[in-house]
Amino acid sequence: MRQETLFPTPRVKVYQLKSSIRTPALAFAGIAALGSLMMPFAGTLTTLDTMIGMAMFLAFGAFLAYYINYTQLLISTKGIEYRQIEYSIRTTWDNVERIGPVVSSVGLGITEGLILHKPAVQARWILKWYANIASRHIPLASFASDWRDTEIGHDIKRYAPHLFTQEED
């Protein structure tokens, strides 16, 4: 299934989760998948138990790897998009109200991000309830620890300078 973006231009920059999140999560996914292959050698499990356990570990590992690789931040001259598996937040720069504390969706707790004037979420039915909670913020620290001093920060400052002039006031 091809997901349409708000910004179908060649100047869209795509950012993945920062390596301090990606690397351990992908390693854990690999360990889960490897664990599923080791289950037949445990010896104490019945065949059905082994098959169910293998399927669960393999499915979990595959889901985690997919989730980590799918979470993206897209930035263009027209706006910003935060993409997750079951929802995305797409908005133009004029809908971004300010920089402030937001809840991270990858387990980092409260981090710094963008707060929107109006909700801009698009979600599938499974996570509609969660997406409505997260619909007015985009976490940035999930993509770079000191995001202001990275390419992400430079892009945001270039396309939405009003966010940084508000902070100086």
Image (cartoon, rainbow, N blue to C red):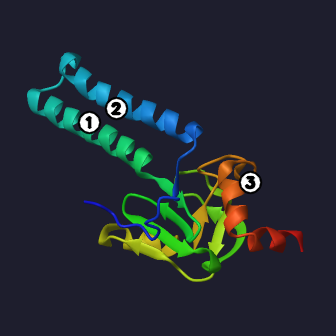
- Marks 2 and 3, how far apart at CA: 35 Å
Q: Secondary structure at mark 3?
A: helix
Residue to which mark 1 is pinned: 58
The kind of residue tagged 3 is Arg
Say which of marks 2 and 3 sits in front.
3
In the rendered image, the residue lying farthest to the bottom is 118
Q: Which mark is residue 148?
A: 3
Front residue (pair 77, 101): 77
Q: State the image coordinates of residue 125 (x, y, percent, origin top left).
A: 31, 72
Residue to which mark 2 is pinned: 32
The residue sitting at 23% across, 24% down in the picture is 37
Specify the quadrant of the image occupied by residue 103: bottom right
Task: Give whichever of discs 2 and 3 has the lower sequence position.
Answer: 2
The kind of residue tagged 1 is Leu
The residue sitting at 34% across, 32% down in the picture is 32
Would residue 9 be seen by someone viewing this image from the given angle?
Answer: yes
Q: Secondary structure at mark 2?
A: helix
Specify the quadrant of the image occupied by residue 123: bottom left
Residue 75 relative to residue 38: left or right: right
Q: State the image coordinates of residue 99 (x, y, percent, origin top left).
A: 72, 68
Task: Give whichever of discs 3 and 1 has the lower sequence position.
Answer: 1
